[in-house]
Amino acid sequence: MKRLLGVALGILTAIGGFVDIGDLVTNAVVGSRFGMSLAWVVLVGVVGICLFANMSGRVAAVSGRATFEVIRERLGPRAGLANLGASFLINVMTVTAEIGGIALALQLASGVAYILWVPFALLAVWLVVWRVKFSIMENVTGLVGLSLVVFAVALFLLKPDWGALAGQAFSPSVPAQEGAGVYWYYAIALFGAAMTPYEVFFFSSGAVEERWKIKDLAQSRLNVLLGFPLGGLLSIAIAGCAAVVLLPAGISVTSLSQVALPVAQAGGQLALAVLILGVVAATFGAALETTLSSGYTLAQFFGWSWGKFRRPAQAARFHVSMIVVLLAGVAVLATGVDPILVTEYSVVFSAIALPLTYLPILIVANDPQYMGKHVNNRAVNIAGVIYLFVILVASLAAIPLMIATGAGA
Amino acid sequence: MSKSPRFRNVVLTLLVVVAGVLAGCSQQPSADALKGPAEEVSSAVRAASLAVDLRISDSTTAAAASTAADDMLGDVESATKEVHALSAQTQEERTLRNDVLAAFSSVSRALLHARDALSSSSNGPSDGQGKAQLSTVQGELRAATEQLDSLMTKAGIQ
Amino acid sequence: MSERKRVQPRQLHAAPSPAGLVLDAQLHLLDRQMLDVDGVPVTTVDDIELSGPEPNEEIPEGTAPPQITALLTGPVLGTRIFGGRPPSSRLIRIPWKVVAGVDTVVTLGVRADSMDASWVERWLRNHVIARIPGGSHEP
């Protein structure tokens, strides 16, 4: 019974933890402009994140080494440092976006300007990073984040023309009022949002934090293979709500308050309250994950002691670097830059940096010195190489498309 | 690996180019250049209209609805700035630009009223006076939408 | 570059056949994580110090083969990335004799706190983390 509960808890937190501000905003923007015609990208992204999260979890459980230690060992200091720079920059951007997301959700709840909520969000995130146990942190934010299921409920309450939605999803085409360039630009943004690299750093470091062993692999595989696809379904529901209400009304999403409109229309104030709770939990959880990820990457590259299972005093550099990252994120928000804009750029830059994260994982998962007999099997390797190709194409196409479309304008 | 410096260069170039694009190369107020800002404002006013509707039917809270109106006001402001940055050459272009700006400012005014009415509607729409106020701003928003729409059709922006 | 012609020994002896584990310094030492005797991460192997002749020095016959004298860490990492040579006073050395084992990590036989390599960690612990309430509590 206890074991079953553990399995259920793992899956539920994986669902709740899948969606962050990037998924929320990107899916709503895409739904309001392209209907369901980009739903296939979420599917492609979910399969990819399942594949690589599983691989990095296995590397961590078998070798006891988190992703970034291995990246430096395999790529050497020069390429490793470049990789660290890019990953760290994107992590800081994502921390900024998530803290902005918490503040925006609290504005939605209170009517008080989001900028006033930013210091509060910063303090709350730091306190959890500083004091709360890893497993409690993961489970609480994941479970509360599950209230984002309200998007799926809202979609049913809106009684859409399911046939038309499925038609858009299964025979995708570029809508008449949008250009093909913009369509592909958002396809890449959506892909980047689903495959965010910080999740892999976090997942593999989390496996070390929770001292996974080889026997825990079955459970982790179940969490990933059930939790992430269901999280992906939730992403599609977000796009669906926007496609049903906002697209026909001629509204294209530029703010979080617009994302809430379809849910309020479907379920009234109760649904709105659940939505706000879910958004706060999801962005809060993701803010924790990205803050920790930036600490993990730095500490693992330079060989510092790290981890929430240690007292902060036993991991001083790790904790100091996370404080600096949080302050940097808040300094960016203090300039008054729109958090939604930061989010939109962060998902595209994530897509650009994807090969840097995923190639080393694929290499190490094939290295018998680390993996013993748990190296990748042939099917996983074939899938991994195919995905690496997709990732590379998306990464190379992102910048030209960004320039050509004026960042999706 | 030779990839890392190249990656860095690409990112730097990209940032410069994006900054250039965002800074806006001085364009003329043709239908093409006005399309972006006009669509932004049209989307904003419709979103605010939906928020007021939801508030009237008590489906949303005063805080969420007034936040939406406030966000939309920000969008209209940035679109207005964008149009101001266009430099008109001919008389025709100048007229078009001024018409668009006039439509934007009536949207902006309607949004301001909507935001105020929404944030003071915290007693709930059951309050008769609040409801009347919300219907008034809804009318104002609709009128501003129509003004913008007819202008967009006339100028061939769509 | 030195203009001198490289001196080749007249007769080359075959390399002695090693007994035990063969390590490739590049592959098995450089950039590896170092853990102290309690399993606490200390730093990474940023470079390696060897005994023996300086570069371009003539090597007389019968010289003892070079040995690893220390693992290096700290600013020396910068010279591996950007080139150059650090002054030897700036090197943080971990003497080879404290190394207890080499696997996918390098284990040391001493505590991290007793080593020069962890001075930044100790400084931040004493001056920053210890001053924030809750810094030394179990999470």
Image (cartoon, rainbow, N blue to C red):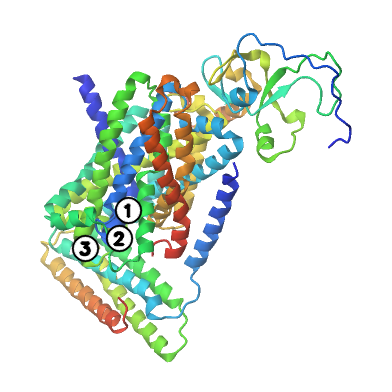
Dot 2: what SS? loop
- Mark 1 burial class by Cα count in 10 Å: few <14, some 14-19, many 20+: many
Residue B51's disc is: 3
Q: Residue furthest right?
A: C4
Write down the residue under mark 2. Answer: A253
Q: Nearer the viewer, residue C97 or B112?
A: C97
> Could you confirm whether marks 3 and 2 are on the same chain?
no
The reply to whether residue C139 is in sight is no
**The residue marked by circle 1 belongs to what chain?**
A
- Secondary structure of the residue carrying tag 1 is helix
Q: CA distance from mark 3 to mark 2?
A: 13 Å
> Residue C90 appears at what percent x and percent y?
73, 30
Q: Amino acid at mark 3?
A: Ala
Circles 2 and 1 on the same subunit: yes
The residues bearing labels 3 and 1 have C-alpha atoms spaced at a distance of: 19 Å
Of marks 3 and 1, the one in the foreground: 1
Tell me if residue A179 can be seen.
Answer: yes
Quadrant showing the C terminus of chain A = bottom left
- Is disc 2 in contact with disc 1, using a CB cutoff of under 8 Å? yes
Coordinates of residue C20 in the picture (x, y in percent): 61, 9
Which amino acid type is shown beneath numbered disc 2?
Answer: Val
The secondary structure type at the circle numbered 3 is helix
User: Compared to A92, does A4 lie above or below?
Assistant: above
What is the chain letter for disc 3? B
What amino acid does circle 1 point to?
Answer: Val
Numbered disc 2: what chain?
Answer: A
Quickly name the residue at label 1. Answer: A25
Residue A280 badge? none
